[in-house]
Amino acid sequence: MVKLIGSNRVRTAVFISGTGSNLKNLIKFSFLNKSPINISLIVSSNKRAKGLNFANRYKIKKKIYNFNSMKKSESLILKQLKINKISLICLAGFMKILSPNFIKKFRGIILNIHPSLLPKYKGLNTHERVIQNKEKYSGCTVHYVNSRLDSGKIILQAKVKILKEDTSSSLKKKILKQEHLLYPKAINKVFF
């Protein structure tokens, strides 16, 4: 099932905190012949993250950091990224904000997927806020990470129509489907 990966692929780390549905999707994407990435490391801020099961299933190296000390955790992560020759980080439901120092020290590219049409609804609880404000559309955005929260250059977006009967939960499901389509497309756009 798992194909041998050529050395010309971009060594990638995926950062997670939860169920890892975007991680699973990126792993499947990485197995495609034309994929530019090889997922070499999974980093989690939560030792109970369900997404860590994918590390076991697909035999990908995993590291867990508790972030009790942000500085110490980030320093250890930077060492791991160097050891594993990582040049791309994909944030996928990672519930920690990386410090400007970390972003500056990491020499590669950092991407994030956010469940709103940025620049609208940065931060948390996006679906609830979108519904409360009676927006007609929402969606998701893949963007470069810079030192300001959800403010990096936008790579791609996907739009979702909000129906009258939508709740934050139903909207989340609709947007997640789009996230799974969008993240691989955005990665291809960055590297091809």
Image (cartoon, helix red, strand yellow):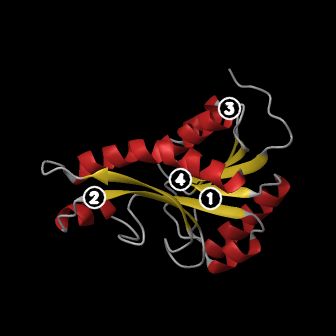
Classify 10 Å Cα crowding around label 1: few (below 14), some (14-19), many (20 and above): some
Q: Residue at x 48, y 41 (%)?
A: 21
x and y, in percent, of residue 157 in the image = 46, 57
**Looking at the image, which residue sits at the far top?**
1
Residue annotated with mark 2 = 137
Q: Residue at x 49, y 71 (%)?
A: 150
What number is the disc on residue 92? 4
The image shows residue 173, relative to residue 58, as above or below, that is: below
Q: Earlier in the sequence, mark 4 or mark 3?
A: 3
Q: Residue at x 66, y 67 (%)?
A: 73
Q: Looking at the figure, which quarter contains the N terminus?
A: top right
Classify 10 Å Cα crowding around label 2: few (below 14), some (14-19), many (20 and above): some
In this view, the residue in front, 173 or 44, is 173
Mark 1 or 4: in front is 4
Residue annotated with mark 1 = 65
Residue annotated with mark 3 = 31
Q: Earlier in the sequence, mark 3 or mark 2?
A: 3
**In the structure shown, which secondary structural element does the residue marked by tag 3 occupy?**
loop
Mark 3 or 2: in front is 2
**In the structure shown, which secondary structural element does the residue marked by tag 1 occupy?**
loop
Classify 10 Å Cα crowding around label 4: few (below 14), some (14-19), many (20 and above): many
Image-quadrant location for residue 72: bottom right
Disc 3 residue type (three-letter): Phe
x and y, in percent, of residue 68 in the image = 57, 69
- How far apart in space, not on screen, are marks 1 and 3 (Cα)? 27 Å
Classify 10 Å Cα crowding around label 3: few (below 14), some (14-19), many (20 and above): some
Does residue 8 appear left or right of residue 175 in this picture? right
What number is the disc on residue 116? none
In this view, the residue in front, 164 or 48, is 164
Q: Earlier in the sequence, mark 4 or mark 2?
A: 4
Question: Is residue 164 in view from this perspective?
Answer: yes
Does residue 24 appear left or right of residue 119 in this picture? right
